[in-house]
Image: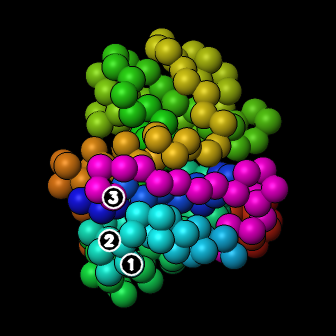
Amino acid sequence: MNILSLDCAGKILTVTLTAGGKLYSANSGEAGSKRHNSLILPFADELLTKAGITVRDIDAIACVVGPGSFTGIRIGVSTAHALARATRAKLISVNTLQARGFGIKGDFAVALQCRPTESYAATFKGDCFNMTSCKASGEDEIAALNMRVIRHEGSLTAENLADFARALAEKGQFVASLSPLYLKKSQAERLADGE
């Protein structure tokens, strides 16, 4: 299965293509943190060229839906929807925290700092496919968890993204539509609510 995967939710844009048993990837590095929208399609095109296939050969498009950067999530979701509509590719919804926990066994949590005293956190029982909670949590709440806590820095590696997308595809976990995963109000919503 040829899978194009997009992660715009962190500072670094990562685009991967799994095709013909090989992994192709491109990322923006730290310099591209404000340019996801101008880089995402050129990266995808570059990977398709390297793999020797066309956009019509993509079977599935995986996209990180959050938690993470609100703007980045919207860029990724809208791009994935447009590509899926044009190619009839299946869609795969990727939770940032679940993907970061892929391959880890036992009871654990993954946390991504969103404010100095708050993080997006998910807890898992056994492995990343058994998520028991996913919410914004205070650092004191995370510290009180009776389990290993993995700190996520905000951008998935190409291998992590591609491997997790492939695992979801193998489980048949396709979705009809991608929905952004916002665990907090956006800055605009907070300002409108007088917070």
Task: Name the kind of residue labelled 2 in the image.
Answer: Ile
**In the rendered structure, are the residues bearing label 1 and label 2 in contact, judged by CB atoms less than 8 Å apart?**
yes
Residue at label 1?
55
Residue 145 pos. (x, y %) = 52, 17
Asked if residue 75 can be seen in this view, the reply is no
Which residue is denoted by mark 3 in the rendering? Answer: 19
For residue 168, which numbered disc appears in the image? Answer: none
Taking 43 as reference, is 188 left or right? right
C-alpha gap between disc 3 and disc 1: 12 Å
Q: Nearer the viewer, mark 3 or mark 2?
A: 3
| Image: 183 above or below 89 | above
Q: Amino acid at mark 1?
A: Val
Query: What is the number of the mark on residue 58?
Result: 2
**Looking at the picture, how far across and down is residue 40, in whole percent?**
60, 70
Measure the alpha-carbon separation of dots 1 and 2. Answer: 6 Å
**Quadrant including the C terminus:** bottom right
Q: What crowding class fits label 3: few (fewer than 14 Cα within 10 Å), some (14-19), or many (20 or more)? A: many
Q: Which residues are magenta?
A: 19-37
Q: Count residues near mark 2 (Cα–Cα under 10 Å), then give few for <14, some for 14-19, many for 20+.
A: many
Real-space Cα separation, disc 3 to disc 2, in angstroms: 9 Å
**Label whose residue precedes the other's in the sequence (3 or 1):** 3
Secondary element at tag 1:
helix
Residue found at x 37% / y 43%: 163
